[in-house]
Image (cartoon, grey):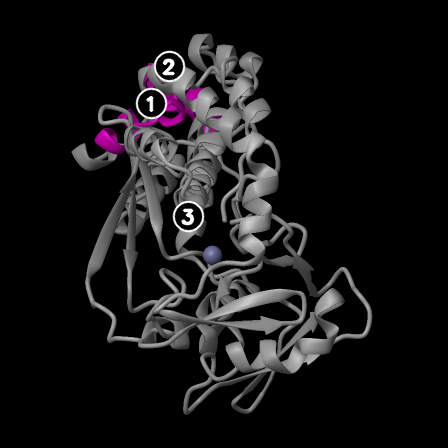
Amino acid sequence: MKYTFPLTSLTLITLLLSACGTSSNSHPRQDFLDRAPVQGDLTPLIQKFHASEYLTSCDQQHLPQMLEIANELDQRSGELEAYSKGLPPSKDYRRVLVGPIVVRERLHPRAPKTEWLSDHTSWQEIIEDYQNAKKDSDPRKWYAVNAEVRNILTDDQYRLNSGEEYAISHGDEPLLKGIHDLTTLCLANINCTHPDFTLDALTWFNKQRYYSALFTKIKQANIHSESEPLLKELRNAIQIDLSEFQIRKNTSITRKGPELTLPLYPGIFSDVTEALANYSEPIWSSRNLKLKITWASRPDDSIFSLILGEHAGGRSYVSFKKQEVHLESDVRAKSIAHEIGHTLGFKDHYYTTWNGTECKYTTEYREDDLMSDAEFASVTDDEWQTLDSTYP
Ligand SMILES: [Zn+2]
């Protein structure tokens, strides 16, 4: 979902040392890309972490075991691939062949919980699971460890190679709007050098290397013209973070009455467009709005294309930048509707934060929001309203 570009060391030195008014023109977040899940060999990826300027004591502590696990999984990649092609029956899902992929349909759905929930992931836990898998040759355990490792490395990769800070929680939108508005007011006032941010805002800045360095520079300014470019940079960065909570309009979508028409290029899925539409259109249809997918006969830069993922235990995702919907085998039926939700412009409504003291990630999510967790969820009232106003 998110993608970042690295703060080069030169930019970082500018950030930390420069007290003059030059803007760094860089922000450790870039909007609107799904985090592409980790694919292929794991060992080279972890070797690259050694040189990261964002390494924390947590990472340093776990690196030797991370390398050992990566090496073991890389050696087992053929075996994992074979295992993923013949997964054993599950009591919770029916596995249906849909063209080049298997789709997992839930057999006994239950009502979703209606509050924010959270999950934690950490290398400590994965190391335990790995040691457990080593004790016997149960392929299920290795398959699970492989999925866990690829999942955590997806976040590690963006945090350590790109400097993404993993600091936005589900309730942070009002805080970010407050920072944005105070910055705008200060920019308009010639007598203002820095806004009087709330304690919550300062605490949030201090959790992040980029913002704490930028705010330190802003406070050093003596006159408005000195802080002005830095305040503009701050406002720009906050706008990017705020976009986490906003829809991005897909300009290829048209609306006629209640019908929303979404053009997609099916690519290798051209024989199973009806099945894919059946996994998505009913979920994205209410009394007032109905999704209709139209299937293009050739790819086009202005529309999303479906792409086949080919990685054992891989996760489906959407790249906004490339306009691609990657569908992996063993995808859950509702995840297809979730990915279609991205093509409608919705971002993920789950929020992952990194705790560098406890060495773990926390992901906040809701079971009742399709864009948050695709297991039991449906489209929320908020999402219907957003769709209606985005595509009038
Ligand atoms: Zn998603």
Does residue 381 appear to the left or right of 117 in the view shown? right
Q: Where does label 1 land, which residue?
A: 212
Q: Name the residue rendered at 57%, 42% in the picture.
A: 79
Residue 188 location in percent, x, y? 40, 39
Work out whether residue 150 or residue 260 is closer to the camera in this orientation and state it: 150
Work out whether residue 196 or residue 268 is closer to the camera in this orientation and state it: 268
Q: Where does label 3 land, which residue?
A: 140
Q: Residues within 10 Å of mark 1 (few under 14, many from 20)?
A: some
> Is residue 178 placed above or below 127 in the rendered structure?
below
* Amino acid at the residue labelled 1: Ser
N-terminal of the pair, mark 1 or mark 2, is 2
Q: Residues within 10 Å of mark 2 (few under 14, many from 20)?
A: few
Does residue 342 appear to the left or right of 354 in the view shown? right
Q: Name the residue rendered at 78%, 64% in the picture.
A: 300
Label 3 near label 2: C-beta < 8 Å? Answer: no
N-terminal of the pair, mark 3 or mark 1, is 3
Q: Where does label 2 land, which residue?
A: 60
State whether label 2 is within 8 Å of ligand 1. no
* Amino acid at the residue labelled 2: Gln
Secondary structure of the residue carrying numbered label 2: helix
Q: Which residues are magenta?
A: 202-229
Label 2 near label 1: C-beta < 8 Å? Answer: no
Q: Nearer the viewer, mark 2 or mark 3?
A: 3
Q: Residues within 10 Å of mark 3 (few under 14, many from 20)?
A: some
User: How far apart are labels 1 and 2 at the CA level?
Assistant: 23 Å
Residue 252 location in percent, x, y? 67, 70
> Is residue 115 placed above or below 40 in the rendered structure?
below
Does residue 164 appear to the left or right of 261 in the view shown? left
User: How far apart are labels 2 and 3 at the CA level?
Assistant: 29 Å
